[in-house]
Image (cartoon, grey):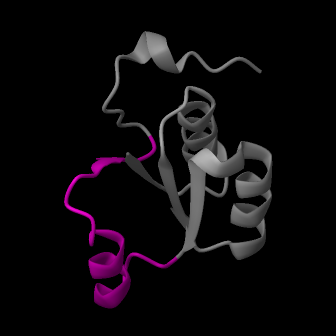
Amino acid sequence: MYIVTGASSGIGRAVAARLATLGHYVVAVARSVGLLEELAVASGPQLRAVPADLITTAAWRLSWRRPATRPSSPGLSMVPPQSLSIKH
């Protein structure tokens, strides 16, 4: 499982979508509810959208409830780069 922050747009969205396409479970976190919902619909059941502002302490704690997660954020990946080749 991966937690991808900034998943509503840009690199975060591309990484979250690609990980879900590869069959990984993804928790996509961002502040933009509408964009996250679009991503969840496009990505299917592998991706769970969690609208949150991680600047707040409560949201940060909520996002880390599951200890068996591996975090990822835009620009940082926990999988080899070749497996994330994103094609436009």
Residue drawn at 19 percent across, 60 percent down? 67
Vertical order, 44 against 27 (above or below) = above
Q: Position of residue 74 (x, y in %)?
A: 45, 44
Tell me: 50 left or right of 63: right
User: Which of the image's four quarters has the C terminus?
Assistant: top right
User: Which of the image's four quarters has the N terminus?
Assistant: top left
Residue nearest the observer in this picture, 49 or 56: 49
Quadrant housing residue 65: bottom left
Stretch of the chain drawn in magenta? 52-74
Residue nearest the observer in this picture, 50 or 45: 45
Extreme residue toward the top, this view: 82
Count of labels shown?
Answer: 0
Residue drawn at 34 percent across, 79 percent down? 62
Q: Position of residue 2 (x, y in %)?
A: 39, 46
Q: Position of residue 73 (x, y in %)?
A: 40, 47
Residue drawn at 63 percent across, 21 percent down? 86
Tell me: 41 left or right of 31: right
Extreme residue toward the front, this view: 45
Vertical order, 5 against 54 (above or below) = above
Residue nearest the observer in this picture, 57 or 26: 26
Queried whether the magenta region covers residue 19, the answer comes back as no
